[in-house]
Image: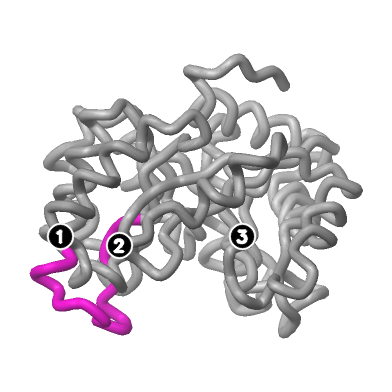
Amino acid sequence: MNLVDSHCHLDDPKFDGDREETIERALAVGVTRMVAVGTGNGPPDLEAGIRLAEPRPCMYATVGIHPHDASKATPDAFARLRDLAAHPKAIAIGEIGLDYHYDFSPRETQRAVFARQLEIAAERGKPVVIHTREAWQDTMALLRSVFCSLLGGIMHCFTGDEAQAREALDLGFHLSFGGVLTFPKAEAVRRAARVTPEDRLLLETDCPYLAPAPHRGKRNEPAFVTEVARRLASERGCSPEEIAEATTRNFVRLCLRDKAATL
């Protein structure tokens, strides 16, 4: 299979002891592309993903300010983000959005920082990678206000229900499914996955978090995206190879449209 892990946090300290081996394990099972999400520890350092991706042909990166770090955002950080968006390895702005579960940054600040990054994505012609937790209505309201100016986007680690899936799809988003799809109590997510059009599906791990069955409780890693592909195939009544082909094609079309990439 030729798979893409469209969202991984390989800069996490949990990989400090075996980062290269982790990447090799992914390549060995057919995960040919990985996206290093570049939020890191937040401003002023916005280059976590690019540092990983730059020397590795199999990796791309995002750049962005996570909602947890919104209170660290400054005019200089936005200027730096705008510059980094032009880096050859930077394929999207993200993960950005709203998180009302932890409220590590004030909600008003989160909304302002989210809106500014949406503007930067539109200016730079980049898709967006959205993080939303317990903030669906506010997230969608902000996206509706600017989405016509954006070049598409990804609902990262989609854990909503069928109605939310249709709402995001109607706005033009791709839905990215991860390990939660395999959890016993995640039937609502599986229903959402079944109704998502083939050309809007993506896969991810969000590693080191949310390892899929049968690895639940362990550190997640890009190689485990194969388990997500298998479960998604089972839910949709097709083969894992068909899921791999479709999700890779979708990733290339959405995120590598301006690069010389082939399937």
Q: Earlier in the sequence, mark 2 or mark 1?
A: 2
Query: Looking at the picture, which amino acid does disc 2 mark?
Result: Pro
- Within 10 angstroms of label 2, few (less than 14), some, or many (20 or more) residues? some
Q: CA distance from mark 3 to mark 1?
A: 32 Å
Whole-percent x and y of residue 220? 70, 70
Whole-percent x and y of residue 103? 24, 81
- Within 10 angstroms of label 1, few (less than 14), some, or many (20 or more) residues? few
State the count of labels.
3
Q: Is residue 105 left or right of residue 244?
A: left
Q: CA distance from mark 3 to mark 2?
A: 29 Å
Q: Which residue is mark 2?
A: 44
Question: Element type at marker 3?
Answer: loop
Q: Is residue 114 left or right of residue 126?
A: left
Q: Is residue 127 left or right of residue 113?
A: right
**Magenta range:** 96-110
Q: Which residue is mark 3?
A: 178
Whole-percent x and y of residue 20? 79, 58
Question: Element type at marker 1?
Answer: loop
The residue depicted at 72 percent of the width and 77 percent of the height is 219
Judge whether 26 appears above or below 150 on screen: below
Q: Is residue 176 left or right of residue 70?
A: right
Q: Which residue is mark 1?
A: 74
